[in-house]
Image: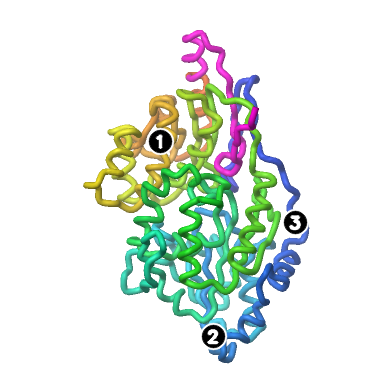
Amino acid sequence: MGFGAEIIEIRLPDETECLTMSKPIPITKPKDAILEAINNPIESPRLEEIIKDKGKPASELEVAIVISDNTRPVPYAGDSGILSPIIDTLIELGVKPELITIIVATGTHRELSQDELEAMLDPSVFERSIRIVCHDCRDEANLKCLGVTSRGTKVFINKRYVESDIKILTGLVESHFMAGASGGRKAICPGLIGEDSTYIFHGPEFLSSQNASDLVLQGNPCHEEALEVAKMAGVDFIVNVTLNNEFGLTGVYAGELEAAHTKAVDRIQEYVTIPLHQTYDIVVTHAGFVGINHYQAAKAGVVAIPAMKPGANLIMAANNVDKDPVGSPYYRTLIHLLTLNGARDFLRLITSEDWNFIPEQWQVQMWSKVFSKIPMENFTYCAPHISQKDAAILPGIDGNLLLPASRRYSGNLDDAKDIVELAVAEAVRKHRAMGIEPSIAFLKDGPYGVPVRTKL
């Protein structure tokens, strides 16, 4: 199982079927590919022309470059880094480094520390003393209202972004369990919106749509709302990338907001889809790079739903290395409500007329989709970084309890190996006790590969 740079090897029963997406060949000369994409954009003028059309000297233009936070493995450093080539191009065209601002599109996530930023970004960014700020969705003084969308979202956007002369978005395009695909418009919505703007975009009605699903854009209310918000805020240029399952660069898509993003989505559909010919009694998966906390691990749970028989066992390994391995106080409260009430009653609660929308309820609603397919007691969460106290508020079985008492809650990823193997053995034993020889699947790519049931 891979968690970015961290890998653990797990022994599963011989009859386990390994379900994995295809492996596109990474680009051999990523630096050249990035420059080629920037200089030959998709359905867009080049940056040089965009600058000329702003009506004032390049040296006076304020530029906002939006980047993802550390929950996404976007290549912002090294040979595949997309940030330095953008900055280099702007400076060569006359833009002053001191007028460039990098805005981290944290959405409702927490602010990143300096150490986290330095771990993400190329050293050249800091050497040039380029301003870096994290978006704060609750800082009303630094938000600007742009009006109301056709669906009723009151749009508050990061003021620095809105007031910049040139607006550039960056990001990774991968499957997304709400918006169909990440990247493109999502850098703004939800990346740069105010907390109040999440009420409709991530509300229960949108997320209840069958089209609010992986790899679905047409008719997906989350995608359509995000796109409308992004257009209201304005976008001059995007630079998005696609990666393979080893985080190698497979494509660079620069240019116009919709056209470049659509090209990237078309690319990932070629290789992330996993044809699914049957469902399974036991499904083993992992939360991948994105699963730095329980909040983010929801993606892996939802992706696994098509592979599971009703009432199946789901076993998930997670490397929850975030400062808070569960999530924000909002998330903690809501996930505990799901644990206490179950999926049906939780959904009834958040769709009640008397319910006041709480930020991050959307992620718990996605977890409830998992527990509408299987009982909570059939889910085992294998995360050594979770404490015993935290585990008590989370749905499912705490995998740490399968270990001897002296090894529980160690914070050592290696212990996840034994937890997963013990959880699988226990699930097999229970099925055999019912006279069932269980079918077992391993979702090798965790949240990144998308199982899709083939039509008979």
Q: How is the image coloured?
A: rainbow
In what quadrant of the picture does the C terminus appear?
A: top right
Q: Which residue is mark 1?
A: 409
Label 1 close to label 2 by CB (< 8 Å): no
Question: Around disc 2, counting alpha carbons within 10 Å, would you say few (fewer than 14), some (14 to 19), or many (20 or more)?
Answer: some
Indicate which label's residue lies in the foreground, 1 or 2.
2
The amino acid pointed to by label 1 is Tyr
Residue 110 position by quadrant: bottom left
| Range of residues picked out in magenta | 427-456
Q: Which residue is mark 2?
A: 61
Disc assigned to residue 335: none
Residue at the image point whose x is 42% and y is 42% from the top: 366
Indicate which label's residue lies in the foreground, 3 or 2.
2
Disc on the earlier residue, 3 or 2 = 3
Q: Secondary structure at mark 3?
A: loop
Q: Which residue is mark 3?
A: 27
Label 3 close to label 1 by CB (< 8 Å): no
Q: Secondary structure at mark 2?
A: loop
Disc 1 to disc 2, C-alpha distance: 51 Å
The foreground one among 323 and 269 is 269
Residue 451 position by quadrant: top right
The amino acid pointed to by label 2 is Leu
**Residue 290 position within the rendered picture, expressed as x and y whole percent measured from the top left:** 52, 48
Disc on the earlier residue, 1 or 2 = 2
